[in-house]
Structures are given as C-alpha cells and as structure tokens.
Image: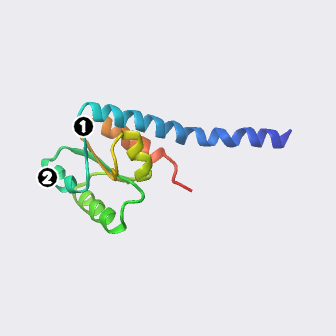
Amino acid sequence: MGDEEDQSKEPAAEVPGVDALEEAMKLLGLAMRSRQVQFGQDQVERSLRSGKVGMVWVTEDLAHNAAYKIWKVCNRAGIPCISKGSTSEMSARVGRDNIKVFILRKGRLAMRMHELLQAWPLAE
C-alpha cells in the first residue's frame, strides 16, 4: 500500500509545471492578440530604450552568445530575462517560424508571465 501511495503522488508533482506552461501559453496568445509582444533579438535593445518592456523570454536553444548579450542588456536595464522552452515548441505554439526571443510590454500580463515561467520546471 505504501508503494501505491508513493506512485500516486509522483504525477501530481508534475501537474503544477504543466499548468504553469499551459497558462503561460494562454497568456502569450492573449498578449499577441493585444499586440503586447514583439519578436526577435534585434528588437530587444530598441524596445528597452522605449522603456515599455516588462520581460524578455528567450528559448533555451538560442545561441549562447546571443542569449548572453540579451541577458546582459536586460540585466543592465533591470528587466527580467527568462530562458525556457525550445524554438520548435514555441514557434509551433505561436504559429510563427523560428521564434527565439519574445519581448513582452510592461503590465499585468508580463508580470504574470514572469511568475509562471519561474514555476515552469527546467527541461530534463
């Protein structure tokens, strides 16, 4: 019986991360429809200068040098930069090809997205 209880607890531990991912994807869709998302690493510095960036989300498979450059610029500006998900996964979810960098405007959506992405478990 003790083993059965342990087995039933294992799937429940994964659910919060899955829920966080699904909610983050829904919020990303909402942000896209309300034009609160920009795409591409070239847009990061330009967007940061505008002062309207709430967070930057880069995919885990973005080239190390590019990711570091974005992180450094965001860190200097005090903007959260989170690396989660793969390019293929994110591109499929947003319906665009080869998207590696998402820039969310300041606001509640960006704050909630940041919270959810921190809860999303790391890839194994």
Which one is nearer the viewer's eye here, 82 or 29?
29
Q: Is residue 29 visible?
A: yes
| Spot occupied by residue 34 in the image (x, y as percentages of width and height) | 25, 31
Comes first in the chain, label 1 or label 2: 1
Outermost residue on the left side: it is 50
Say few, some or many: other residues with alpha carbon within 10 Å of mark 2 (under 14 / 14 to 19 / 20 or more). few
The amino acid on which the numbered mark 2 sits, given as a three-letter code, is Arg
Query: Closer to the observer: label 1 or label 2?
Result: 1
Above or below — where is 28 with respect to 74? above
Residue beneath label 1, please? 36
Residue drawn at (36%, 67%), measured in percent from left and top? 64
Numbered tag placed on residue 5 in the rendering: none
Which one is nearer the viewer's eye here, 25 or 3?
25
Above or below — where is 17 with respect to 33? below
| Spot occupied by residue 81 in the image (x, y as percentages of width and height) | 33, 53
| Spot occupied by residue 90 in the image (x, y as percentages of width and height) | 40, 46
Quarter containing the C terminus: bottom right
Outermost residue on the front side: it is 97
Say few, some or many: other residues with alpha carbon within 10 Å of mark 1 (under 14 / 14 to 19 / 20 or more). many
Disc 1 secondary structure class: loop
Q: Is residue 108 visible?
A: no
Q: Is residue 71 left or right of residue 123?
A: left
The amino acid on which the numbered mark 1 sits, given as a three-letter code, is Gln
Disc 2 secondary structure class: helix
Numbered tag placed on residue 49 in the rendering: 2
Residue drawn at (32%, 68%), measured in percent from left and top? 65
Above or below — where is 22 with respect to 83? above
